[in-house]
Image: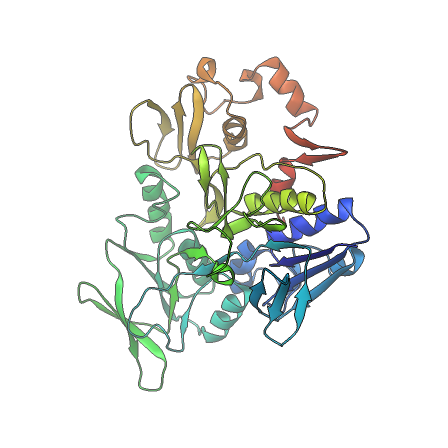
Amino acid sequence: MADYVIIGNSAGGIGAAEAIRQVDREGRLTIISDEPYPAYSRPAISEVLARERALDRILYRPKDFYQRLGIQAILGTRAERIDFSAREVYLADGRRVHWDRLLLATGGTPFVPPMEGKDLLGVYTFTRLDDALALDQRLRPGSHVVVIGGGLIGMSVSDALVKRGCRVTIVELMDRILGTMLDPEGSALAEAAARRAGVEVITGHTVQRIHDDGNGNACGVTLDDGREFACRAVVVAIGVRPRIDLVADSPINVGRGILVNARMETNVPGVYACGDVAEAYDIIAGTTRVVPIWPAAYLGGRVAGLNMAGWPAEYPGHFPMNSLKYFGLKIISGGVQVADGDGYEELRHGDDQSYRKVILKDGRIVGATFVGNIDRAGIILGLMREQLDVSSLKEKLVRKDFGLIHMPAEWRRQRLYGEYPTLKTPGLVLDRQAAVRSEVA
């Protein structure tokens, strides 16, 4: 009887556990997490802060999930060390857990740059439920909060803070917000929406120092140009890095993240990795890289889980993709956002409220941006995922009326009858779309 151990209790770990149980109902399956909560939707923590959802409404799986799948869930206990020779995980409480197959789904850790005052009370990151709960307790009516970082996390927490009646100042080092997931035109529309909601947006600068009120509490910030702002809280939302501390000084090969092959297996037999900690295949870049998005984590976890249980499967690849709605503005983007180099072709259509762009290379879609009107985004992202030649359609791709009717008949039949591209394994079918459907509504 095999011992399966998964370190990490988010999308990748859950995807792996479900895949393992599809194949092996008898093996011992353990999930280890330093968070005390059942699996929950991390993207939904902003809704908890905004008080739009109760805690039990962001659960990723039903409360009886672990019991139904026969999983031993060790929650609220940190994995401190891995002995790859003895095949044991050392826990913070002194326990050891043996493994025959191990999955590292440890996710990412927030990046907090060295700055004076970063350890004061009232300074938060925003990637976990505890972050949202702690910040919630700090807020008062009309509180001024400085958010360092205008990326996805920064926009998420800023939107929630506005809904709570707070005054918000976003400080972004780049010359525009959402600079890694949008082009300049899309960023401008996002910034305009934030400003309409009352958010102050400062770009091209960063926070140099966080002030101490004399009692260990944050009470203000100083920017790199000398400007000062009083505030009740500071949220550091610069980004995350793969959490690779468990494999430091180990036999595991690491680049920016843990290196894996198409089976999501590391260079150490029996050890797998997925999600934000792993470098997996990006179909647009044509190489392995960290793609820290929820659907990729779930799908990578499923591939890892099937292989851990002895059923061959290969990761079909993914690409950077984001879907959000902040300050009333809907945005979907994927792949390349700013064409850099020869051979690219950009198709655009937009007005003051809406913007659509598709980037082609060699007749295939390699990037897409939809801001405002996102009705056709799903079709475009599907074409990008499948890397179909759309040369004959390119004049139609950004039109408002573009839809299934413009697609080849065979492609339409597949979609109308629910036949999506699948990854076949002996006796099982791994549906790529399951990764997207796995997110809570």
Does 40 sit left or right of 149 as displayed? right
Q: Position of residue 206 (x, y in %)?
A: 26, 60
Residue 234, given in percent of the width and then of the height, sits at 37, 69
* Residue found 53% across the figure and 70% down from its top: 133
- In the picture shown, does residue 423 fall above or below 116? above
Q: Residue at x 57, y 17 (%)?
A: 405
What residue lies at 79% left-to-right and 55% top-to-bottom?
1
- Compared to 347, does 125 lie above or below? below
Q: Is residue 150 left or right of residue 417?
A: left
Q: x%, y% of residue 122?
A: 40, 75
Task: List the single residue furthest toward the left.
Answer: 225
**Image check: 226 left or right of 134?**
left
Q: Which residue is most to the bottom?
A: 215
The answer to whether residue 333 shows anywhere in this view is: no
Q: Quadrant of residue 104?
A: bottom right
Q: How is the image coloured?
A: rainbow
Foreground pick, 108 / 425:
425
Q: Is residue 329 visible?
A: yes
Numbered marks: total: 0
Residue extending farthest to the front is 85
Q: Is residue 356 left or right of residue 205?
A: right
Q: Residue 20: give x, y in percent of width and height.
A: 72, 48
Residue at (45% x, 75% y) in the render: 138
Between residues 232 and 362, which one lies in front from this camera angle?
362
Name the foreground residue: 20 vs 412: 20
316 vs 390, nearest the viewer: 316
